[in-house]
């Protein structure tokens, strides 16, 4: 034997069975962290691609700058691409037509269409001023194909174009649209149309940064160099948010919470490994004392313990990395092939650098860190104590266990649990951390549910909308739809915006007003933020009560009085969600809506289908969509929302199951080591009359002590964390209390 370190592989073989639990704890901890962060990185990568497909890959938009300034910006070394786009008549309030439909005009360049938004769906990009790309709904609305001739009709005259392709930069906006079509033309053609009609142009410059650029510094530099203000620049929040460079305060708050949860997960792995190492080293204290007897120095003992910990990592860390990667691949495969939807393009067999690095970090670095204290304690063992067999015997003090109440085995079990304060703290912390993480992740599920309106019970499968929320539908249409075979449920709602009002509250000079029919009012109870069911019932019928939609910036509260056109209404309760998004939104019954506004009709009819619905059902419902009504099939969007939420549930519950399993193994390992260390003591107890049932109760009392202290600590800290997370993630943004 050349050195004491040569004992490490020999010790590993001799104590293979005793080290099994330690190796298992390290492996499971590495597996836990690797799998979670591998899945998270793959999910973020897939979600980023989906968001870029939906919102474009540009980072910021700069308004009201000249062409020359845009070209100067494009020459910066930290800019990847610059594209231009401008639009006109997107609200369809001007007499511009393509064929017989209203036309929204767009002047774009190739960079914007092909690189920054990936707008082209079929055909080609306009190559000349005589070609246009139409939004995909125009194929059906105008009955045209690629190569067809279309006429753009404007107040200044008509212009003929050839259809080069189909696509748009906002696919959701034109999907199901029969009232208007998007017309994408070259910037020169757009300029000619605007000049002929004496209209002012307002082009926008869309900027994409190179990877690794410090976006905030670049934006500040551009502002300073060209004299721009905050009003000139807006960001693509979805893309900037995923890259962690968004200036949006709401996203930054979520980042902080994500970082906190990240450290909670890492802390779970560290605690499991630390506790297991602590127990393992404590069990072999006599062995280290004997090493001191044969000449090993304290420094050599410390080095021995550290290298022994690394020797365990040699087997446990690769095993954890492999198992974690395989688990991540399995989850990704299920998301892609089992759930599909927006996960259909998710990569399955992809290695995650973040997951692997996190696993190695937990496995190697934390094992070395966790071995520090046990190594120093092992180095302090007295050689004389090891020889005499008096390890752990303190002559200066005597500890007397008093049996105040109950059986002696329960008293001994509690004493064994709290006798080693460090081990007791680690066990309690491990148990408590599992409870804390469980409570925090339950808030994560609530947050995911609030983000997905498609999970609401009133979410329609099909909808008929008056264009720009015009009140062009009526109750007779809703009743006729209810009589169609395959229709389970239908509701109607009306909407008016920017109604001038006066209020008892401060800062309310206008509101948006929405009506609910009886079906929607009944479903609103699941969204109550403030108030109770009795308050909600007061809104029914022709009453002076309304509901307000909660917003963190809303200036109203329950009991406020508002005067609308000379009619007084009172806010009876607050809800956290509504059909129409927007600020300052009040909801009333249909009867109250008609009395307050003097207008009849519905802006939207929503339809839910039952299992008997078929294509004939959908055809009959879509038949009620006239030239000024948009028919939308919401089923695919609802399915995507359901699959996303199911994926979040699988990830959250899978993580909690692994956390629970790690905690269980750790407690089993610690109690097993505790029992092994006291084998002689238990033998003496048996010799003086203690039976096996009493021994079992004593060990149960020890485990019960860990559980009780862990529950108190976990619930106390966890409920506080739970309250803070719920308040910041849900109450402040969605109004749910």
Image: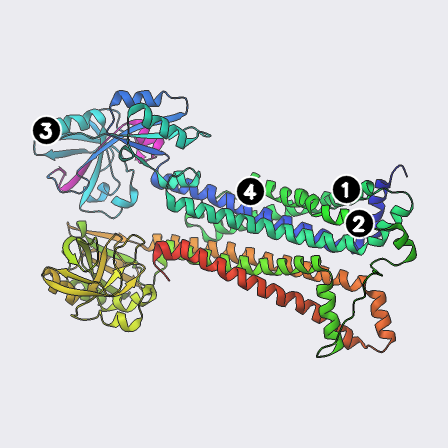
Q: What's the CA distance linking mark 3 and mark 1?
A: 81 Å
For mark 3, give the secondary structure: loop
Name the residue located 11 percent from the left edge and 35 percent from the top edge.
153
Q: Please provide the residue range marked out in magenta.
A: 96-125
Taking the magenta stretch, the answer to whether it contains residue 114 is yes
Q: What's the CA distance linking mark 3 and mark 2?
A: 88 Å
Name the residue located 76 percent from the left edge and 71 percent from the top edge.
401
Relative horizontal placement of residue 487, taking residue 96 as reference (left or right): right
Looking at the image, is mark 1 or mark 4 nearer the viewer?
A: 1
Q: Residues within 10 Å of mark 2 (few under 14, many from 20)?
A: many
Looking at the image, is mark 3 or mark 1 nearer the viewer?
A: 1
- Rendered-image quadrant of the C terminus: bottom left
Taking the magenta stretch, the answer to whether it contains residue 398 is no
Q: What's the CA distance linking mark 2 and mark 4?
A: 44 Å
Looking at the image, is mark 3 or mark 2 nearer the viewer?
A: 2
Residue 349 got which mark? 4
Disc 1 or 4, which lies upstream in sequence?
Answer: 1
Disc 1 or 2, which lies upstream in sequence?
Answer: 1
What residue did someone put label 3 on? 198
Disc 2 or 4, which lies upstream in sequence?
Answer: 4
What residue did someone put label 1 on? 307
What residue did someone put label 2 on? 378
Looking at the image, is mark 1 or mark 2 nearer the viewer?
A: 2
For mark 4, give the secondary structure: loop
Whether residue 675 can be seen here: yes
For mark 2, give the secondary structure: helix
Q: Are circles 4 and 3 on residues that touch, CB within 8 Å?
A: no
The image shows residue 714 at horizontal and vertical percentages of 57, 62
Relative horizontal placement of residue 579, taking residue 115 as reference (left or right): left
Kindly indicate the quadrant of the structure image that contains residue 411.
bottom right
Q: Are circles 3 and 1 on residues that touch, CB within 8 Å?
A: no
């Amino acid at each position: 034997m050349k050195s004491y370190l040569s004992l490490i592989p020999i010790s590993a073989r001799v104590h293979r069975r005793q080290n099994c639990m330690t190796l298992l704890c390290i492996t499971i901890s590495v597996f836990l962290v690797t799998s979670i962060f591998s899945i998270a990185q793959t999910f973020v990568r897939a979600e980023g691609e989906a968001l870029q497909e939906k919102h474009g890959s540009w980072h910021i938009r700069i308004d009201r700058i000249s062409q020359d300034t845009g070209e100067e910006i494009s020459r910066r070394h930290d800019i990847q691409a610059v594209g231009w786009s401008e639009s006109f008549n997107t609200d369809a309030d001007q007499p511009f037509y393509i064929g017989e439909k209203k036309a929204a005009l767009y002047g774009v360049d190739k960079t914007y269409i092909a690189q920054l938004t990936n707008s082209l769906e079929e055909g080609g990009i306009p190559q000349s001023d005589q070609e246009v790309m139409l939004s995909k709904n125009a194929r059906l609305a105008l009955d045209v194909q690629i190569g067809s001739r279309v006429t753009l009709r404007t107040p200044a005259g008509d212009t003929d174009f050839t259809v080069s392709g189909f696509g748009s930069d906002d696919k959701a906006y034109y999907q199901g649209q029969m009232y208007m079509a998007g017309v994408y033309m070259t910037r020169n053609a757009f300029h000619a149309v605007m000049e002929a009609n004496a209209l002012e142009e307002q082009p926008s410059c869309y900027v994409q940064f190179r990877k690794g650029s410090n976006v905030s510094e670049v934006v500040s530099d551009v502002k300073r160099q060209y004299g721009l203000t905050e009003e000139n620049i807006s960001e693509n929040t979805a893309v900037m948010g995923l890259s962690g460079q968004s200036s949006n305060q709401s996203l930054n708050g979520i980042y902080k919470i994500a970082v906190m949860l990240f450290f909670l997960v890492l802390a779970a792995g560290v605690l499991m490994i630390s506790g297991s190492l602590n127990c393992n080293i404590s069990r072999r204290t006599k062995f280290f004392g004997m090493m001191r007897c044969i000449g090993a120095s304290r420094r050599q003992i410390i080095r021995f313990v550290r290298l022994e910990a690394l020797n365990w990592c040699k087997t446990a860390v690769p095993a954890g990395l492999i198992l974690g990667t395989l688990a991540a691949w399995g989850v990704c495969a299920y998301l892609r092939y089992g759930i599909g939807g927006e996960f259909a393009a998710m990569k399955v067999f992809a290695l995650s650098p973040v997951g692997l690095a996190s696993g190695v970090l937990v496995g190697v670095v934390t094992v070395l860190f966790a071995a520090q204290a046990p190594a120093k304690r092992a180095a302090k063992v007295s050689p004389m104590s090891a020889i005499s067999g008096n390890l752990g015997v303190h002559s200066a003090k005597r500890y007397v266990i008093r049996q105040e109440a109950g059986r002696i085995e329960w008293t001994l079990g509690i004493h064994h649990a709290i006798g080693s304060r460090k081990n007791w703290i680690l066990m309690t912390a491990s148990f408590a951390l599992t409870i804390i993480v469980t409570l925090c992740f339950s808030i994560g599920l609530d947050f995911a549910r609030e983000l997905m309106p498609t999970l609401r019970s009133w979410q329609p499968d099909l909808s008929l909308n008056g264009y720009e929320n015009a009140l062009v539908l009526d109750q007779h249409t809703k009743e006729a739809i209810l009589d169609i075979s395959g229709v389970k449920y239908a509701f109607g709602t009306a909407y008016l915006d920017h109604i001038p009002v006066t209020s008892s509250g401060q800062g309310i000079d206008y509101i948006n007003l929405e009506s609910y029919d009886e079906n929607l009012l009944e479903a609103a109870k699941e969204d109550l933020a403030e108030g109770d069911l009795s308050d909600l019932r007061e809104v029914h019928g022709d009453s002076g009560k309304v509901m307000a939609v909660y917003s963190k910036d809303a200036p109203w509260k329950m009991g406020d009085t508002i005067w609308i056109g000379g009619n007084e209404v009172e806010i009876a309760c607050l809800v956290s969600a509504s059909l129409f998004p927007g600020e300052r939104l009040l909801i009333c019954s249909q009867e109250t809506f008609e009395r307050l506004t003097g207008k009849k009709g519905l802006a939207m009819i929503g339809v839910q289908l039952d299992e008997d619905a078929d294509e004939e059902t959908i055809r009959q419902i879509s038949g009620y969509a006239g030239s000024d009504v948009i028919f939308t099939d919401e089923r695919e969007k609802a399915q995507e929302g359901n699959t996303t939420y199911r994926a979040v549930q699988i990830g959250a519950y899978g993580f909690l199951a692994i956390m629970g399993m790690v905690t269980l193994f750790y407690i089993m390992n610690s109690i097993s080591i505790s029992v092994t260390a006291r084998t002689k003591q238990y033998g003496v107890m048996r010799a003086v009359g203690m039976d096996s049932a009493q021994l079992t109760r004593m060990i149960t009392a020890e485990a019960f002590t860990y559980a009780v202290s862990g529950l108190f600590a976990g619930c106390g800290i966890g409920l506080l964390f739970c309250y803070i997370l719920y308040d910041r993630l849900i109450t402040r943004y969605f109004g749910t209390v």
